Amino acid sequence: MILLCFSLSIQAGTGKNVKESDSTVYYLYINESDPNPMNDNMIELKYKGNTIEGYFWGNSDEFSEAREGYLPGFFILKMKNVKVKNDSIFFVLDSKNESYFSNPIDISIHSSKAAIKRGYHLWRQNFSFFYDSIGYKGTISHDTMMLNKTKYPYLDTHKFIRTSFDKIKKRNRRLSIKDEKNNTSFHSFLSRYFRPWKQTKASKQIFGGDTIKDLIDEGFYSAYLPSSDLSTCKGEMRWKGGCYVQHKGFVIAFLRHICMDGGHKMLMEDIVDNLMMVIYSKDGNVIDKRVIGKKAFLILLV
């Protein structure tokens, strides 16, 4: 009787049915030929009763045949039509109308909207070139998942290893600051620091408020800032976005070039605002720039 029970327990533990009741499991793919973490793919499967919900973290290479001369964009997508039966798995990734980002998305984020709220920058390439719907199929076991695609197939079947949430979190998947700067979009620059001007006539409000808050991060967006050769500022210079209008394929942006000319007697500091208009191409190239007004004031150094 003891031997019979022992035999039954072994058979139950080695079955192929990988469906796990009310649990969340993670699988990680690392490209062995190019183990740069930006090439990682990650899958989360949530089992609840008879339903399975899945999420996929990856990059734009999933939706193209080859990449040459540019860094990929990164996405988080909810898997559609997820089916796990015995040792087989099938699902669809649909990137249409989703966003791509300049840096790999953290595994704690489960949608494009959540990534935007967390401050991720949008990718500089045209998203629509990478809009597609692709089926994935393969085999799944307790420890691994072997996947291929029905479109743009992998050169070799991708082997995903089951791992933990904590181990994935510890992988440093972020790009260098230099690479992310080169991978960030003009649209991200506009949406972060400007708002569309909806009035029919211009007013001073088109340059934004008078505060010196929410200044433009020149580290990430220097490529979209005009040269400062129109200013004679000898002190610290900063930029602040105002509003923009789109006209015949061009973007006309209004911003403040703030010059802080150093200390002043009685704990005051001179501030000079150059009110600038910059004309961009739709891709963010500076076509023209000019100072169309100035204002000066003092602030109390507290």
Image (tube, helix red, strand yellow):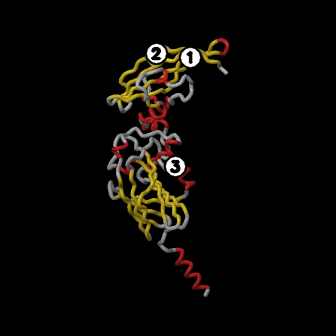
SS of the residue under disc 1: strand
Percent x, y of residue 25: 52, 61
SS of the residue under disc 3: loop
Q: Earlier in the sequence, mark 3 or mark 2?
A: 3
In the image, what residue occupies the spot 46% across and 15% down?
293
Quadrant in the picture for the C terminus: top right
Q: Is residue 285 visible?
A: no
Mark count: 3
Q: Nearer the viewer, residue 302 or 106?
A: 302
Q: Could you tell me the amino acid type at mark 2?
A: Gly
Percent x, y of residue 96: 37, 49
Residue 213, by quadrant, is top right
Q: Earlier in the sequence, mark 3 or mark 1?
A: 3
Q: Return the residue at label 2.
A: 293
Q: Nearer the viewer, residue 167 or 188?
A: 188
Q: Return the residue at label 1.
A: 271
Report the side of 188 relative to 3 (left or right): left
**Nearer the camera: disc 3 or disc 2:** 2
Percent x, y of residue 78: 45, 54
Crowd class of label 1 (few under 14; some 14 to 19; many from 20; radius 10 Å): some
**Nearer the camera: disc 2 or disc 1:** 2
- As drawn, the residue found furthest toward the front would be 200
Q: Could you tell me the amino acid type at mark 1?
A: Ile
Q: Return the residue at label 3.
A: 109
